[in-house]
Image (cartoon, helix red, strand yellow):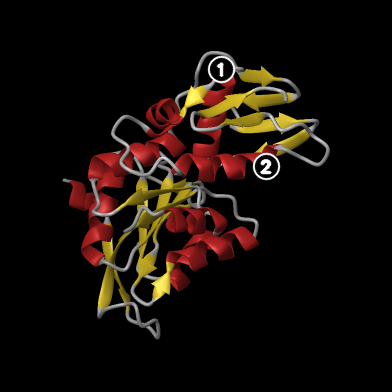
Amino acid sequence: MLREAFSLETVPQSSDKCCGVGFLVMSASFASDGPESLSGQTLPAVLVVESDENLAHAMGVDLYEAGYMPVEVPNLRLGLVRARESLPALIVVARRLSEESGLDLCRQLRAEQNRVPILLMMTHDELGDRIACLDAGADDYFLAPYRSEDFIQLVNAYLKPSLTSGDQLRFADMVLDLTQRHVIRNERVIELTMKEFELLKYLMEHPREVLTRKQILESVWGYDFIGESNVIEVYIRYLRLKIDGENEKRLIQTVRSVGYVLRES
């Protein structure tokens, strides 16, 4: 039974006001080589920072069934401790944690040069929320209410990426490494978030072709994406800031009222 795979321990309430009387944690037994399943196979650890006990438990069960080892904590203080000690493969954090903000955890980890992917759970999908999410250092976000299938699909995209044929895509002086999932331009190695990578990959697969916003949304965000098309503008902005260095040509061009095209100006 699934319940037997976990040791349920209660993190007692401390001075952190966001906690209730206690918080159930699906705790993995961390050996020197990382968390293991019952069969002894190493599982990637996913840190879940969520103050809602029932929601955190639901995420934990879904993660374990999908082949991951969940580590659940109810507040930012414990989240920061676990992120440093457990070295998770991925971190999931709610933007709103009672009186705290998940954005603070993102900022703190990025300030410490921790590059582990961070997924933020948000209750609103507005332009300002998306910008705040990216500015804080989160890699991606998903929306409440919680949906198991969408959540695991997003986690898999980061931890079980499917590689396309070939190792690289090239355009002008830019090389996209499909294995390492970063871009190289003029000997600069540029790290990308998952969504930035998928967006740039799509543009580089269609060089000099004008792509409409609808095409980009359907190909990068999926047919079932529900949101404003200006989410593209947000990610294009961040991509340009990363790939266009001083005295380098802008490669992603805006086609007014249509979309974008990858070409040398």
> Does 159 sit above or below residue 117?
above
> Does 65 sit above or below residue 105?
above
**Along the line of sight, the residue nearer the viewer: 116 or 249:** 249
Q: Residues within 10 Å of mark 2 (few under 14, many from 20)?
A: some
Quarter that holds the C terminus: top right
Q: Judge from the rendering whether residue 166 lies leftward or rightward of residue 213; answer left or right.
A: right
Q: Amino acid at mark 2?
A: Lys
Task: Give the labeled residue for mark 2.
Answer: 242
> Does 42 sit above or below residue 101?
above
Identify the residue at image location x=39%, y=34%: 221
**Visible residue check, residue 40:** no
Identify the residue at image location x=54%, y=38%: 196
Q: What kind of element bears circle 1?
A: loop
Residue 28, position as x, y percentages in the image? 36, 55
Residue sticking out furthest to the right:
247
Task: Give the labeled residue for mark 1.
Answer: 209
Q: Amino acid at mark 1?
A: Glu
Identify the residue at image location x=59%, y=22%: 204
Indicate which label's residue lies in the foreground, 2 or 1: 1
Residue 216, position as x, y percentages in the image? 45, 29
Residue 48, position as x, y percentages in the image? 37, 57
